[in-house]
Amino acid sequence: MKRSVKVSMLTISALTGLFVFTGLSGVKVLSKVASEELLTNSSFEDPAVADVGILNRASPRPTGWQMFTSGTAELMTLAAGLSHSGNQAIKFVSHGVPDFYQGFYQAVPVNPGETYQFSVYAKGDAAHPLKNTVTGQLSIEWHDAGDNEIGRLWSPAWDATLPATQWTKFEVVGAAPPACAKAHCVIVEKGQAPPVAGGVFLVDDASFVKVTE
């Protein structure tokens, strides 16, 4: 049985003033999570790969997800046999370029005032740990009907302390602000100066759901 731990967090939306605490008792607990998964290909099983394949402009990418970078090469991989569940996960490999970033996002329709939870499971690599300033993180970017960003929430970041022997759940929860039409669910790796190339982490089983009190 695969082990996993959960990172709890307290977050506040600057636009709504909503406090949310996940895990231990806190200011406001969202105890009911809707069962409907709002992401497409949330476990990265499509397309299937026989082995590890670097995702670049000539190779398959996870269906339903959009890739972005800071202009550096895309060092993100569909990895078979390294998953939290199913058969595949996404493998991120860090750059040695200062201020680099790379990641995936998926846009999902939302309703203003409703509360949503975005989460993934992440795991380190003992042979290739993250070093120096390289981190991974989730965000929910709120967009209006004109695709203008009108707010953003961040999860706790993971770094060189991310366990390589078990999967850790990271999440961010918040209410969609007024005039919000969709959320960008973002998984990003980034490094300031000086990042170290070759660090690895895996992500799997992303989820974006509506929650109720």
Image (tube, grey):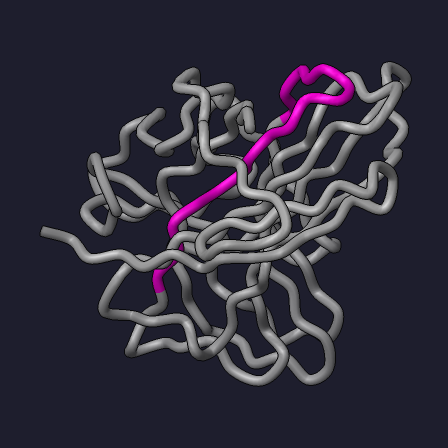
Residue 191 lies in what quarter of the image? bottom right
Please identify the quadrant where the C terminus is shown: top right
What's drawn in magenta, residue-wise?
Answer: 107-123
Q: Residue furthest left?
A: 1
* Relative height, residue 150 to residue 203 (above, below): above
x and y, in percent, of residue 17 in the image: 82, 43
Residue occupying the point 73% across, 82% down: 193
The magenta stretch spans residue 26: no
* Relative height, residue 201 to residue 36 (above, below): below
In the visual, does 133 lie left or right of 17? left
Question: Magenta-highlighted stretch: main secondary structure?
Answer: strand
* Relative height, residue 182 to residue 95 (above, below): above
User: 175 or 97, which lies in front?
Assistant: 175
x and y, in percent, of residue 120 in the image: 44, 45
Residue 141 lies in what quarter of the image? top right
Residue occupying the point 67% across, 15% down: 109
Residue occupying the point 29% across, 78% down: 127
User: 23 or 172, which lies in front?
Assistant: 23
x and y, in percent, of residue 71 in the image: 74, 54
User: 48 or 160, which lies in front?
Assistant: 160
In the visual, does 114 lie left or right of 177? left
